[in-house]
Amino acid sequence: MKRLKTLVLFSTMMLVFGALAACGNAPSDASKDNSGGGESVSGSIVIDGSSTVFPIMEALTYQYNQKNPEVDVTVNSSGSGGGFKKFTRGETDLSNASRPIKEEEKQIAKENGIEYKELELAKDGLSVVVSKKNDFVDSLTIEQLQKIFRAESGVTKWSDINPEWPDEPIKIFSPGHDSGTFDYFNEVILEDKPMKEGQNTTLSEDDNMLVRGIKDNPYAIGYFGYAYYAENKDSLKVLGIDNGEGKPVKPTPETIKSGEYTPLSRPLFTYVNLKSLKEKQQVADFVKFTLKNAGEAAEQVGYVALPEEKYQQQLDMIKEITK
Amino acid sequence: MQLINHQNIQKRSGGRVLLNKVFKVLFFLSTTVGLIFLSMLLYRVLTQGTGHLNWDFITNFPAPYPDKAGIFAGLIGSLMLMAIVAPITIIIGVGTAIYLEEYARKNRFTNFIQANIQNLAGVPSIVFGLLGLTFFVYLFQMGYTLIAGGLTMSLLVLPVIVVAAQEALRAVPNDVKEASYGMGASKWQTVLRVVLPAALPGILTGTILSLSRAIGETAPLIIVGAATAIYSIPDSLLSKYTVMPIQIYNWTGRPQEEWQLVAAAGIIVLLTVLLLMNAIAVWIRNKFQNRY
């Protein structure tokens, strides 16, 4: 009998728990969560988007939260594309992106009446790397890069690119097709032509996996954000990229900042919803804070800051809008 | 004439004894494979993570510096999520199992339901994430909130709990039930006082296993909008939230080495919560075991 009582008690507890969970706080807070709608005074900022930009945004929101703990900031990282999906529905105030907004995304935003402004936060140099054990390549031209990565070139061995190089298959390590990093590489190198697939190509959304794949294989090549190279300088060799001028340039904070490392320097963005910017005081405040501190935050997490005047210009523009 | 031909027996049993030994070794090896990988994982996680594991790590919110980052938001988020998932799934899951096993007539329709539940138990978790996004987040307009995440996770674990509860109910000996009916008890009285207490250990085992799955899931929660960085804990069912696996996943993706250590510390916290959950369940199970 005692056990039965315990059982009944236990299930009653569960029931009460369930009932509380089902209806508990709902009514009082329904009005509070207007974050997607605008006009709210609740003081929340909703940010989503690129996981590449996430570390910068995390650093910024962290500092902002220390100063303004009453503002509720949340940052998600569902990728540039996933972020824009929510942004163009008006669900988020800011959307981080490691590539510019696409035509079809602009179209959706227009249909939903979403107006936005693009803000550039920092720069990243897509670094093309090989293993330290690779002793034959130091730099590549854009044309050679295209031969290595494009499926149509038919190139499979290093010796196909340069007869002096070893007669070994090229092992490609690339970020997955959903990532903004791949999108950018696709735009400037692949030019929308299909990339090689098959047993010598490894795709991964986790850049640390790419690092591990490349560092022990002298015949491997891959690309990812500069920070991943900077952290693994001991085991990786970064290649100079020759954009046709006959002078290969390696990515360094200086060459990325000055724009000398091209075309693989990519800008990192955040897009701000104009309605949020005008109607939510906390969003306007945070965007100004962002533009004042983005450079420092970017460098802290391994990206390259923009020249100071670039931030100032954008700040002036925001001040103009929110006046 | 000898009654037992020892030589003959020895000759014929040699192969069987050997076979027995071979299988014993084989089964032992299969057990050790799991154990070896588990201990490797534990060793790696413990050596990497203990350095970062301290009270600050447990009570801090996310931060851009590895030594200041903490898992508090994820820990509380995961626990609150479980507080939603556990009662919902246990009540609905066990209810479904009781209906299917004790009340429903065995016909084509119930067979159809049965087959579907078993199939659902094998559906990839990301599909439940999309389902949750369509229904809870958009259709019911819950937004990217704790309750939407909790309901999505409940859907994910429900089929497993139903199947486990059914197995447990089926294992209750028929004669016990018949004895109860013989005493004049109604079906409900029999279920409540005889069948359920006897099946409880089995039901709990299934529940624990599926809740453990839920607490480690990342993919569906990313889809229904759990945050990656958040500086407050949920104060209502309609708050934004995050969970431990999402934070750990974010840390492992960072380029800097220190973040890997932070991630390992996060894994230790996650494993500890998992162990605690299991321990509580084992304790409850032992309390109710050996009734029949």
Image (cartoon, coloured by chain):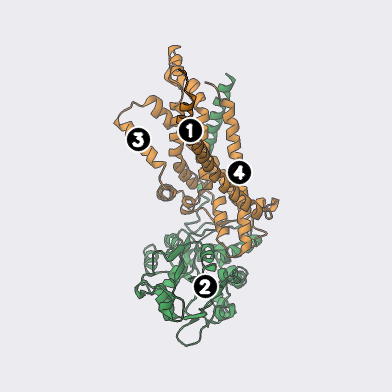
Cα–Cα gap, marks 2 and 3: 55 Å
Numbered disc in front, either 2 or 3: 2
Q: Position of residue A240 (x, y in %)?
A: 52, 80
Indicate whether B200 appears above or below A79.
above
* B108 horizontally vs A5: left or right: left
In this figure, which residue is indicated by the disc labeled 3?
B113
Q: CA distance from mark 4 to mark 2?
A: 41 Å
Q: Provide the chain ID for the residue under circle 4.
A: B
Q: Chain of mark 1?
A: B
Whether label 1 touches label 2, CB < 8 Å: no
Q: Nearer the viewer, residue A205 or A202?
A: A202
- Disc 1: which residue: B14
Residue A25 shows in this picture: no
Q: Which residue is mark 4?
A: B273
- Residue type indicated by callout 2: Val
Give the drawing colour for chain A. green
**Could you tell me residue B9's position as x and y percent?**
47, 26
- Marks 2/3 same chain: no
> Which numbered tag is attached to residue A130?
2
